[in-house]
Image: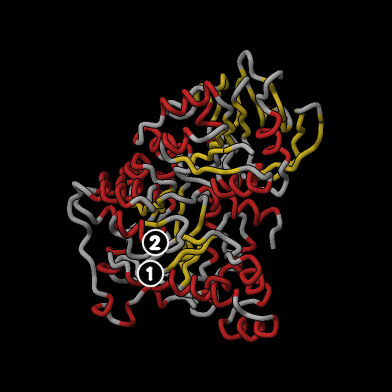
Amino acid sequence: MLNKEFKLKIGLAEMLKGGVIMDVTNPEQAKIAEDAGAVAVMALERIPADIRAYGGVARMSSPKMIRDIQAVVSIPVMAKCRIGHFAEAQVLQTLGIDFIDESEVLTPADDFNHVWKHSFKVPFVCGCRNLGEALRRIAEGAAMIRTKGEAGSGNIVEAVRHMRTVTSEMKKVQSLDDHEVVAFAKNIGAPVELVQYVRESGKLPVPNFSAGGIATPADASLMMQLGAETVFVGSGIFKSSDPANRAKAIVDATTHFEDADAVCKASEALGDAMPGLEIGSIPEDELLQKRGW
Amino acid sequence: MAVIGILALQGDFEKHALMIQKLGHETVFVKDQIALNKCDRLIIPGGESTTFLKLIDRLNLRKVLIDFGAAKPVFGTCAGLIILAKEVINDNFKPLGLIDIEVSRNAYGRQIDSFIDDVNLDFNGAKESYEAIFIRAPKIIKCFEGVRHLACHMDDIVMAANKNILVASFHPELTDDLKIHDFFINHFAREGQ
């Protein structure tokens, strides 16, 4: 699976490690993110908290707003396409987007099929809630995996659940004997060869990032300590009372995620975090993480 | 056994660590001056150069890195090359200026323009072909006096060095070939050279 194209895709994901990727909706926010030390920005029309509030069908961002953001920053620019919407992905590739997020935050275009990502030159990131889902997306060509969490909730509990599920299933895979591998792969709905890869290397074949509910420096530190290699912050920055300082603080806490003094320092003198949502208060059919499979 | 520091503010520092460990040396992830003081040599990895420089300044590491580079060998790959350069022509930030080269960021374009291709290595007395990985890579636009050319890709210089500083616009740490790391640790900037 490590052909040249795939190596290049994973290579860019490697460059983003240890950093923070921030959702932005206009050039001013993109600049704030870059100045704060973001390693990439995700260009989207509305941040997840607003998508949730606004309702309706959420689609790929307009090419104009993507170009406007590409024009003002030198760090990589990512953008989202709807699950299964390969035509949106083709447009994003034409725009020279550096990474496409086939994202459950947008309204899915296909109930059954995700994009066959191997046929694109641009790398993709996809969300997952467990190891089976992660390996299915990697089989389709995802060069980076992230937890889904619950986007726009400001609540870290789902990202933690998804990260812990992936890592505990990886530990389980490593304890399998030869005879158990195929049955395990069947049960989690993942290709046998990818399960074998995890069993032998103890790692996913692509970098593993975290998204969905990160709102504070300590949230970022928590996800990094749980094994995330980079964090995505969606609504957490531009729904807070002081985006520029919060953005910086989350970057600092991610760099020094193991150093509680540094995370403490980053957490001081920040205004209010975004208001959060209790997951139980979100109606079942409005949970974004249930989109895709 | 040498102690090789890797600047670990962000980027693919773990990939460099794996290479160094395979070569039998100790690695230290550097996020502050205390860690830097333990190192015989330093690597500045690939990553986002804008992020590196923001963090270097926020953590007051600029002067200590410049002092380190004046005294001990430093190797920069991709973003690391940008950080070590004298000048970046298409960005308004100020790199460390430890090697007298002028560079252009993302000179080949965006991620869809990233590529893998053979480059010609010319160092350590050997001339050979080497498969190099370029990701949103910078270009060395100009090399001033005292800078040696160690590899080229078509007409571009892709690896260069002065007395203490080694830079590559590609990513040897993403390959399985230990040659360039071995050169940096065991042969580069040794006494009598």
Q: Is any part of residue A109 visible from this angle?
A: no
N-terminal-most mark, 1 or 2: 1
- The residue that mark 2 highlights is A223
Same chain for the residues under marks 1 and 2 in the image: yes
Q: Say which element carries label 1.
A: helix
Which residue is the extreme one toward the front? B1
In this view, B41 is above or below A8 = above
Distance from Cα at disc 1 to Cα at disc 2: 7 Å
Provide residue A190's location: percent of width, then percent of height: 60, 78
- The residue that mark 1 highlights is A160
Label 2 sits on what residue type?
Met
User: Quick one: label 1, few (<14), some, or many (20+) residues within 10 Å?
Assistant: many
Label 1 sits on what residue type?
Val
**Is residue A239 rendered to the left or right of residue A126?**
left
- The residue nearer to you, when weighing A8 against A20, is A20
In this view, B148 is above or below A118 = above
**Is residue A16 rendered to the left or right of residue A276?**
right
Provide residue A174's location: percent of width, then percent of height: 60, 74
Which residue is the extreme one toward the top? B145
Disc tally is 2
Asked if the residue under mark 2 is in contact with the one under mark 1, i.e. CB atoms within 8 Å, the reply is yes
